[in-house]
Amino acid sequence: MRTLVDLNADAGESFGRWRLGDDARLIPLVTSVNIACGWHAGDPATMQRSVELARDGSTAVGAHPGFPDLAGFGRRAMALSPEDAARACLYQFGALQAIAARCGETIRHVKPHGAFYGLTLKDEGVAEAIVEAIATAAPGVRIVLLAGPVSERLAERGFPVVREAFADLDYDDSGHIIIEPEPLPKSPETCADQAEAVLRGEVRSVTGNPIPVDADTICLHGDRPNAVDIAEAIRERFASAGVRLAPMAEVADARG
């Protein structure tokens, strides 16, 4: 069982006067945060506020680029070529990087959002283009992809990939995550059970089949209504099991 892991959350997804998630309470509970960059959610003020919360809570800052789809929250499929996908990530990464620099922070990782994340699973060319673009533009910045064959192949080629698993999403029999159209409250203890299962290297699909998983970071979603309760339950479970939480770069470096 792993005893060192990162706990990350997707956050910074409010827009203007519309508020989504309890970032002020959630961000200090995780070791890395993925901040929306204005395409699927977020705006400049929200981005800055999120970076400040991360800075004040000693949480590593990451960019969370999505599809240009505010109405669909970036969860509707779009067709992007590998080159277009790479440019989309660079554009959004650059916007958050500038805001982070003003706050005295550095972007440590990039994680595609929603349907963009799903595209990296379906099209390995897209995943490779994103990884290469970020590695060239910002050496040392990690790229977060689902733990599985695609991330393993890219990691074997020497790219700075961080392998991710999920505490608050179900898996199908192929090992892919199942995205809910509208996140509902989920049992914190059930999510803590799944997070602990990730550390043991195996989760169960919705049909009960074992899914092997080798992950450096575990994600939960800030737009889930009880995300804070879930984060607290995972932290308590890990503390009782002697598991240490650390930002994903430290975890990946320890992995070697």
Image (cartoon, grey):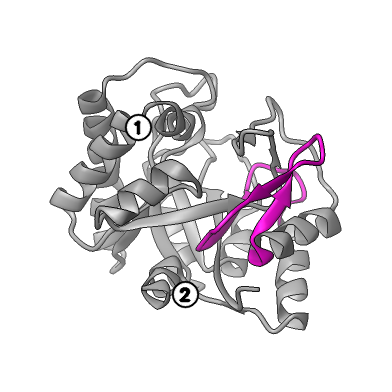
Q: Name the spot of residue 86 as percent of width and height, x first.
A: 24, 33
On screen, residue 128 versus residue 34, left or right, reads: left
Q: Name the spot of residue 44 as percent of width and height, x first.
A: 36, 43
Identify whether 103 is placed above or below 190.
below
Q: Name the spot of residue 18 as percent of width and height, x first.
A: 59, 34
Residue 87 vs residue 217, the one in the foreground? 217
The local secondary structure at tag 1 comes to: helix
Q: Please, what is the three-letter code of the amino acid marked with disc 2?
A: Ser
On screen, residue 182 versus residue 18, left or right, reads: right
Mark earlier in primary sequence (2, 1): 2
Residue appearing at x 74%, y 56% in the figure? 194
Q: Residues within 10 Å of mark 2 (few under 14, many from 20)?
A: some
Instruction: Locate residue 140: give its quadrant.
Output: bottom left
On screen, residue 61 versus residue 16, left or right, reads: left
Q: What span is in magenta? A: 199-227
Instruction: Locate residue 236: give its quadrant.
Output: bottom right
Residue indicated by mark 2: 58
Residue appearing at x 55%, y 58% in the figure? 214
Q: Is residue 144 visible?
A: no
Residue 211 magenta = yes
**In the rendered view of the protein, which quadrant contains the N terminus?**
bottom right
The image's mark for residue 162 is: none
Residue 16 vs residue 193, the one in the foreground? 193
**In the rendered view of the protein, which quadrant contains the C terminus?**
bottom left
Q: Residues within 10 Å of mark 1 (few under 14, many from 20)?
A: some
User: Marks 2 and 1, Cα distance to the nearest angstrom?
Assistant: 33 Å
Residue appearing at x 46%, y 35% in the figure? 117
Check if mark 2's residue and mark 1's residue have beta carbons within 8 Å.
no
Q: Name the spot of residue 207 as percent of width and height, x first.
A: 81, 34
Identify whether 143 is placed above or below 2.
above
Give the mark toward the camera: 2 or 1: 1
The image's mark for residue 124 is: 1
